[in-house]
Amino acid sequence: MLNIALFGPPGAGKGTQSEFLIKKYNLTYISTGDLLRKELAAGSPLGEQAREIIASGGLVSDEIIVQIIEKTIAENAQGDGFLFDGFPRTTIQAYILEGLMIKLGTSLTFLIDLQVPENVSVERLVNRGKTSGRSDDNETVIRNRLKEYHEKTLPVLQFYKDKGVRHKVDATASIEEVNRQVLDIVKEEQRKRLFNVVIFGYPGSGRGSQGKALAEHFGLEYVATGRMLEEEIAAGTETGKRIEKLYETGELVPDEIVVPLIEKRLANAKGVRGFIFKGFPRTLVQSYILEGLLRKHDATISRVIEIEVPTLELIRRLDERSKTDRCMPYDSSTAKIVKRLQEHETKTKPVIEKFSQLHEVHKVDGMDTFDNVFQRIADIIEPPVM
Ligand code: AMP
């Protein structure tokens, strides 16, 4: 998830900057000010409790704030992330936000501190007051809002400075210039996150050889479940023996064997830029597991590729491989080859179908030279430049 907080005094341009960020990154917008105004308009008990305080330019109690945001956060837990505008406004709210994010297995990615001097704030708000219809956009209340900002909200910055996730922007510049600076920050932050690619394709489509080459090219870690399983077999462990038997029949290796191996790879990901997954997820269950495992590392799937090769060509390639020293234990007979193709058809195709609803699945024609197919996929992958 990408979770951003826009910070700054009233009139810094938080609302304006929010608009383009939520569109560009598909974020759920949470403006505590807007939520409170809705409660006021609806005349709800929470709104009634807050009415006087808002009118005077004071800060509404943390107790009320927590109640108005919790529902929106819970309802959008599966989204791409949140954009917080005007929250957190007190140090207590910063702790509350931390707790809410932990509950979703994520955290505040960073905070953007929009800096404007007091006279600019006042001037902007007085101007806004002419058209906003907001009773709190008048000079007396504005002064009070700024006083509250200095006393209660500014200390929140220290909380995020200590965490190393605060970015400053000079918000006296034009809207476009501030946009540009904010965008640079988002891009810089995205480069710090894991970049993960999933490569799909029938056995024989070239997903393995392409995956390996692409991982090397982009400096990503290549995660092939097949290879991990072979290492178990080579080590002669009990698990290895079980895997060997399953390979002989061409069946899928069960998740209780595969998942801990993947989990270990992710846990050892210190200093890693991202992963290329090949041969995982192979089933719907595994796709949920992968999303969950990545989420634990505050990461998601960045690109999904499906290499397409006609069935007859797949059979020809697998048959050819079975006669070379690249022969895998599971492609030593026609029956096993057919079984593997069927497994992909019945178990993995539904995963690709599901992914196409959540992510963009990039289909790549695999009927070409290795280099041409490589180039096609590389053009799609294009991770953020380091
Ligand atoms: P805003 O639209 O963000 O400028 O908020 C308008 C008013 O709503 C503020 O002056 C406060 O009275 C109240 N308010 C909005 N967000 C919060 C918050 N996070 N904590 C306390 N009060 C808030």
Image (spheres, rainbow, N blue to C red):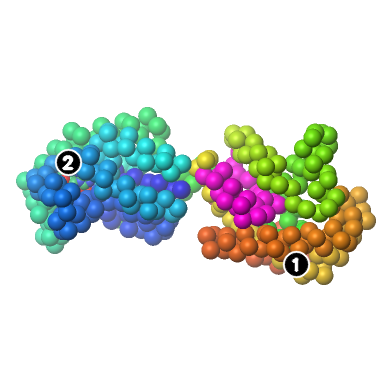
Q: Residue at x 37, y 29 (%)?
A: 162
> Does the magenta run of residues contain 164?
no
Q: Foreground: 58 or 71? A: 71
> Does mark 2's beta carbon lie closer than 8 Å to ligand 1?
yes
* Segment tinted magenta in the rendering: 272-295
Q: Secondary structure at mark 2?
A: loop
The answer to which image quadrant residue 261 occupies is top right
Q: Is residue 58 left or right of residue 202?
A: left
**In this rendering, is residue 150 above or below 44?**
above
Q: Where on the picture, by quarter, is residue 107? A: top left
Is residue 287 part of the magenta span, yes or no? yes
Q: Name the residue at the right extreme.
A: 323
Task: Name the residue carrying label 2.
Answer: 59
Image mark count: 2
Specify the amino acid type for callout 2.
Leu
Badge 2 crowding class, 10 Å Cα cut-off, few under 14, some 14 to 19, many 20 or more, is some
Q: Position of residue 207 (x, y in %)?
A: 73, 56
- Residue shown at 82%/39% (left/top)? 241
Q: What is the three-letter code of the residue carrying label 1?
A: Val
State which tag comes first along the sequence, 1 or 2: 2
Which quadrant of the structure image shows residue 266? top right
Q: Point out which mark residue 309 bears.
A: 1
Residue name at image x 31 percent, y 31 percent? 158
